[in-house]
Amino acid sequence: MPKYNVIALIDCNNFFASCEVLFDPTLAGKPVCVLSNNDGCVVARSNEAKALGVKMGMPYFMAKKQFRGVTYLSGNYARYSEISKRIMTKLYDYTPSVEVYSIDEAFLDLSGTRKLYRCSYEEIIEKIRLDIKNDIGVDVSIGLSYSKTLAKLACEKAKELNKKNPKIGTYKIGYKKIKDELKITTIEDIWGVGFNTASLLRKHYISSAYDFCSQSDAWIKRIMGKVGLDLKYELLGESVSPVNPNEALPKSIQKTLSFANFTSDKNYIINALNYHCHRVCKKLRHHGLKSSVVSIMLRAKDFYVLSTKTTLETPSNSEFEFNLKIKEMFDEIYNPNIIYRSCGVTALKLSNEDAYQMSLFNSERIAKNQKLSDAWDKIEEKFGRSKLHLGTNALG
């Protein structure tokens, strides 16, 4: 038998709804739905809401008429992002090989950790599940197997078990169980197989994952190309797509948002730029990056865009450094006779945090501002976002 990787998929159960229950425990055990931007449709449901029959993607205006006993909440994506970051950070306690797949999913390569923790892989993923539940308060399901595709399948099994018994939240597909699992997995339930591909395969009398894997390599490659061949071997337990912990670094970071009401109020717009500036700089620090060029944008009511950019004396990820330039740029393009609908801040020409030399003449100011920004991060980590704000005089 060839050597197999040991891969786990952690998936937060009903993540957005779980976050809302976390912040408002009175919602526990009740049907809860989280809505998309502008409250358009349902994007997350608690188990209780699912049991009532609320469908994912259901328009809000239809759902509230049909399911009156459900609590509908506007999505707070900044809050969900904070909880996600705490969960993902905790995963690194178990292995450095973590691939964040989405806001509520992550793959882990646990190969070799059995010796480190002196327990089975099943016990390790149970520890992870309980650790996240006890320390953060979010329920997760964890699938364990030898490839991402099988880990995803195992995770779906774990979710099914969890609905029946909340004390169960993990599932393992071991080597001896692969064939049996493939036989009971329909072609539509394979991760990565869409409607069109499933329809094509069914035309060839392939209805299960086992049927698919029983086809010759040449036939699969002819019908689906290399993607299909990779899928076959992933289903057979070979890690064709290994866990990749290297997060792709962005080339630029931009934060924009429309105003609640169109305005030409100078202080209102400056406060909005302050807010976007902090969000940009915080993300730069998260990625370990600094920017040497900063840009601001003002979008008028008629969608006409005014923008400008400037180069920083020294690459930075401190909002206190950025604001020195933002004030100058704002005065250049702001017109009190124009009504604005949105604004934004963009960081460009990004480089690694340590790949620069501090300016000889401003080193004391830069070091002080960096310490202030780091302290801001620590305060938000402890007390949550929006506890501190830069006032309009911070740009003056």
Image (cartoon, grey):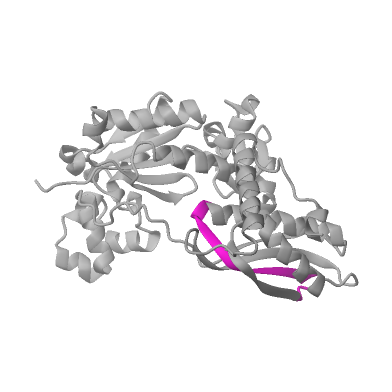
Question: Residue 291's x, y, as percent?
Answer: 57, 65
- Taken as a whole, is the magenta stretch helix, strand or loop? strand
- Quadrant of the image occupied by residue 338: bottom right
| Residue 39 % position (x, y) | 68, 49
**What is the x, y in percent for residue 376?**
64, 44
Q: Nearer the viewer, residue 345 or 106?
A: 345
Magenta span includes 303: yes
In this rendering, does residue 8 appear at all? yes
- Residue 141 horizontal side relative to residue 380, left or right: left
The residue sitting at 67% across, 73% down in the picture is 310
Answer above or below: position of 170 versus 278: above
| Residue at image point 63% right, 66% down | 346
Image position, residue 42 (x, y; %): 60, 46
Q: Residue furthest right?
A: 337
Q: In which quarter of the image is the C terminus?
A: bottom right
Residue found farthest to the front: 360
Q: Quadrant of residue 79?
A: top right
Task: Give the residue displayed 72% in from the left and 69% down from the top.
Answer: 297
Magenta stretch encompasses residue 145: no
User: Does 355 sit above or below residue 287?
Assistant: below
Name the one closer to the observer, 34 or 303. 303
Report how many numbered discs are placed on residues in the image.
Answer: 0
Residue 388 or 261: which is nearer the viewer?
388
On screen, 299 above or below 380? Answer: below
Residue farthest to the left, as pictured = 1
Q: Give the left or right position of residue 193, taking residue 370 as reference.
A: left
Q: Can see residue 301?
A: no
Q: What stretch is highlighted in magenta?
A: 286-304
